[in-house]
Image: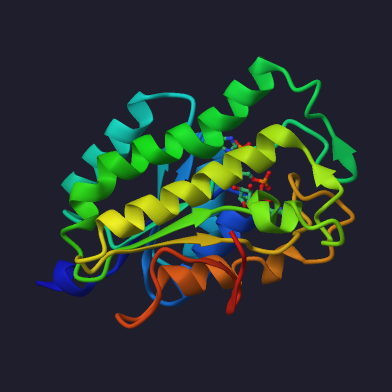
Amino acid sequence: MEKQTEKIAFITGANRGIGFETARSLGKLGITVILGTRDIEKGQVAVNELQSLGYKAEVIQYDANQAESANSAFDYIAKNHGKLDILVNNAGISLEQLMGFNNSSLISEDVLHKTFQTNLFAVIALTQKLLPLIKKSSAGRIVNLSSILGSLTLHSMPNSPINPAKAFAYNASKTALNSYTIHLAHELRDTNIKVNSAHPGWVKTELGGANAPMEVADSSKTSARLATLDADGPSGGFFHEGETLPW
Ligand SMILES: NC(=O)c1ccc[n+]([C@@H]2O[C@H](COP(=O)([O-])OP(=O)(O)OC[C@H]3O[C@@H](n4cnc5c(N)ncnc54)[C@H](OP(=O)(O)O)[C@@H]3O)[C@@H](O)[C@H]2O)c1
């Protein structure tokens, strides 16, 4: 009976950065957090830290570059929990300099493929695979870690703060991810599953770099909020903390 009320979350790329911080925030709420990490030993270190705080944490191997990873995530969650309440598609990469840079005329196919594989294709494959388990939840929540750098509206405004940040592969992968959020939310509009895109802020992580203004400790607010939305919360939106961002 207990399994019916216990909330289960799966967070990809959760051994460090915003993913780990999101696991910490959800763990603090009493949610069982399953960390998906491509290096299982790093994942175990992260799990040990969460367990030492009294949180319910587990780890499974998840690599966005390995198609089998989505299948093994499904098998593990189905066998051990029977359902999934929260999926945080957090794992992401940037292979380009993100700020003050425009590589549109130089971008290589290799960088495009690698970036889209992790930031988009793997997210779709994992979400599709886990959807039957999310449909078993009474309040499924899917959070896609996007970025304000995926906003076409802000990119096309000459005076917007992100206007000079035109790393094409990363930005376009997040624009496409936002499109997936809108499309999936529409398909699921008559279910109790909500799908939203999150911009965490510009965060001091390996990806965000040392000049980012936001500390990692503050970085999970948006993901955690969207992961725990009430039944009357939004679906198919793009948010930073409580604020709606333009597509
Ligand atoms: N930091 C920012 O300012 C910022 C702003 C907007 C959006 N975001 C988004 O927020 C998310 C988290 O970013 P972050 O700043 O926390 O990045 P980060 O510190 O670089 O951490 C990235 C995480 O993703 C994992 N990862 C990378 N490639 C993977 C793969 N192929 N399979 C599985 N896991 C993989 C990494 O695992 P390893 O440890 O094994 O490398 C790590 O756990 C990303 O989607 C990013 O685009 C970040």
Instruction: Decide if residue 147 is in sight here.
Output: yes
Tell me the quadrant of ligand 1: top right
Q: Position of residue 5 (x, y in %)?
A: 20, 74
Q: Residue at x 52, y 71 (%)?
A: 25
In the picture, the quarter occupied by the N terminus is bottom left
Determine whether, in the image, residue 76 is placed left or right of residue 87. Answer: left
In the picture, the quarter occupied by the C terminus is bottom right
Q: Position of residue 31 (x, y in %)?
A: 37, 70
Query: Which is more toward the observer, 192 or 153?
Result: 153
Q: Position of residue 140 (x, y in %)?
A: 28, 64
Instruction: Decide if residue 12 is in sight here.
Output: no
Q: Would you place residue 127 above or below residue 21 in this image? A: above
Query: Which is more toward the observer, 82 or 70?
Result: 70
Judging from the image, the colouring scheme is rainbow
Determine whether, in the image, residue 135 is placed left or right of residue 71. Answer: left
Q: Residue at x 37, y 31 (%)?
A: 69
Extreme residue toward the left, this view:
1
Q: Would you place residue 113 above or below residue 49 in this image? A: above
Query: Which is more toward the observer, 64 or 155?
Result: 155
Q: Residue at x 65, y 16 (%)?
A: 110
